[in-house]
Image (cartoon, grey):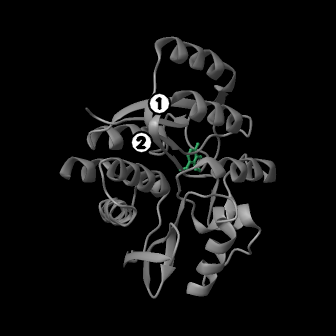
Amino acid sequence: MNKRILTMQDLSCVGQCSLTVALPVLSAYGVETCVLPTAVLSNHTMFKSWSYLDITPEIPNIFGYWRENGFKFDAFLLGYLGKKELMNLAEKCFSDFSAPGAVRIIDPAFGDNGKLYGGFDGNYVLAMRDLVRLADVIVPNITEVCYMTGLDYMEKYDKSYIETAMGEMKKYTKGAIIITGVELEGKIGEAIYDGGEIRYVLSELLPKRLHGTGDIFASVFAATYLNGGSLDESCRAAGEFVADCIRNTSDEHFYGAEFEKVLKSR
Ligand code: PXL
């Protein structure tokens, strides 16, 4: 039987991120994908303006019917939630709807390039830091690690900085930690810690950064991991997928990565 995952994040109607990435990618990888939209936005927040419909008040009602119908999930993928009140609901979701051995993957998804995304503040960061203690795997970028741990954000760094970041981050979770978008020795990839030595999965650094690639990474990572890949194999697969998306995105396309062609070719 296929694995069943619940992905909890916003639905941005336009913008190739969160649910409009997770749903097609996870399904294409053969994972039954259920969604819990936390908010409906006209478009993602990297555009100049956006509407925001908060779904939080409806979630307890949804949970009620899920309980009645006896739904359980083999895995969870959490991304952009939107409001700190959703952390308690995420915790409830884990406790009430986990199938035995369910895997909880959390992408903190609140910032990049040293800054928070629009609409987030320090309280959201602290609530997310509290939630990641329940994760089996977290996939923050360096910006998110810095916000959660208080480490200074740096654009250029060496391995010792990543080791410090990992050392700080592991105070907040017993899960595996995968720091994404790590640039070292002219390459880019992930730093992985699951006890023992930190491992690195690095590949070619492309001269372009696109919005939404963290969401693509998390989805391919989750799908590969659920299909039996190791942490390292899942990072490698997700990193290669993202790199292909970047290579296949035309220069005029400014608000996301054109992942569709890549997904079709897999
Ligand atoms: O890709 C992360 C993300 C998800 N959802 C929304 C966003 C962003 C990043 O800005 O705005 C609504």
Q: Which mark is residue 22?
A: 2
Residue at image position (69%, 49%) is: 128
> Which residue corresponds to mark 1?
35
Tell me how far mark 1 sits from mark 2, CA to CA. 9 Å
**Residue type for callout 2:** Ala
Q: Which mark is residue 23?
A: none
Find residue 239 and report its horizontal and vertical position in percent.
37, 65
The residue furthest right is 123
Q: Are marks 1 and 2 in contact (CB under 8 Å)?
A: yes
Would residue 28 be found to the left or right of residue 62 on screen? left
Would residue 253 be found to the left or right of residue 113 on screen? left
Q: Earlier in the sequence, mark 1 or mark 2?
A: 2
Viewer-side residue, 261 vs 190? 190
Question: Within the image, what quadrant is residue 59 found in?
Answer: top right
Residue at image position (68%, 35%) is: 86
Viewer-side residue, 179 vs 175? 175
Find residue 71 and report its horizontal and vertical position in percent.
46, 21
**Residue type for callout 1:** Val
Would residue 105 be found to the left or right of residue 239 on screen? right
Label 2 CA crowd tier, 10 Å (few <14, some 14–19, many 20+)? many
Q: Secondary structure at mark 1?
A: strand
Can residue 39 be seen by looking at this rendering?
A: no
The residue furthest front is 100
Label 1 CA crowd tier, 10 Å (few <14, some 14–19, many 20+)? some
Residue at image position (43%, 38%) is: 20
Find residue 194 and report its horizontal and vertical position in percent.
50, 66
